[in-house]
Image (spheres, grey):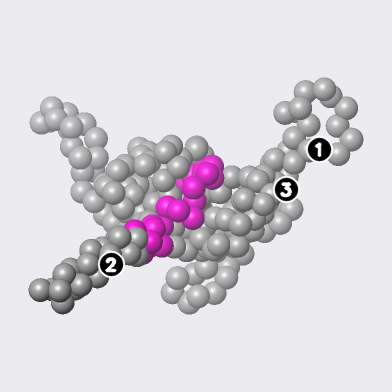
Amino acid sequence: MKILKRKLTVVLTMIPLIAACTNLSHRKHDPQRRFRGMGCVLVIDAMRDVEVFGLEFYDDRGSEIYGKAVQNLRNQSMFALGGIYVPVTVRATWREGRGWDDQKKIWNEGVIIGDYTFPVAERIPDEVLNDIREHGGNLRLKFRVQSDGVLFGWDIERALPIPNCNTREVLTCMATHLFSPGGDFKEAYISRGKVVEKGWYIDKQTGQKIETDY
């Protein structure tokens, strides 16, 4: 009987330790912990000469985080990501034949012709996040649609003061700068209509880095 009581006491003593280890393991694998307290911006456009219709982005929870009737390079979208939830994965779809059917008098959802799911959160390096915590700025999540998929990249958006700015308006004396680009592509830096620094993307078939002027 005494032996049984001892064993029961040991088991009861171990329960809080087991629970603590379980919670620690859960926190360790929580992908959102890395991004807490950060501002995130989504940037979406398309490769030159690529235009898709009915573009929709869904995160790993199945929530729609972006939608646009027509997406191309010219109508780039940029907005703050609400809820500060960085998607573990993103599913991107686009369609053809979507629109109003005059003959049937119904809305036609069309047919999905592009359907791609790819990782997001795990690809962003800790070094980038540590840089933001130390020096400030927003994490930009960038998506560029191709005819056969979606390129994903990231960088840090940081507002810095303009040297020798004489106006008293603080915001007028600030300029946006981009740091630590990474991923599948980087936009070109264009100033006053001229390409100051070329962009690039990684060709998924060959793995080569190809320069762009946009």
Q: Nearer the viewer, residue 9 or 166?
A: 9
Q: Is residue 115 visible?
A: yes
Q: Earlier in the sequence, mark 2 or mark 1?
A: 2
| Marks 2 and 3, the one that precedes in the sequence | 2
* Residue 45 in magenta stretch: yes
Q: Which residue is mark 1?
A: 162
196 sits to left or right of 199: right
Q: Give the left or right position of residue 189, taking residue 56 as reference.
A: right
| Number of the front mark, 2 or 3 | 2
Q: The magenta stretch spans which residues?
A: 23-46
Q: Give the mark, 3 or 1, whose residue is nearer the N terminus.
A: 1
Which image quarter holds the N terminus?
bottom left
Residue shown at the point (64%, 55%) measured from the top left: 131
Side of 87 relative to 106 (left or right): right
In space, the residues marked 2 and 3 are separated at their CA atoms by 67 Å
**Residue at image coords 76%, 27%:** 170
- Whole-number angstrom distance, CA of label 3 to CA of label 1: 21 Å
Mark 3 highlights which residue? Answer: 194
Q: Position of residue 36 (x, y in %)?
A: 49, 47
Under circle 1, the secondary element is loop
Q: Tell me where residue 135 appears, x and y as whole percent.
A: 69, 49
The disc at residue 14 is: 2
Q: Residues within 10 Å of mark 3 (few under 14, many from 20)?
A: few
Q: Secondary structure at mark 3?
A: strand
Report x, y in % for residue 79: 50, 37
Given residues 110 and 24, the one toward you in this image is: 24
- Mark in front: 2 vs 1: 2
Residue for point 38% across, 41% down: 66
Residue 192 belongs to the span the image colors magenta: no
Q: Residue 107: image x %, image y %?
A: 18, 32
Q: CA distance from mark 2 to mark 1?
A: 60 Å
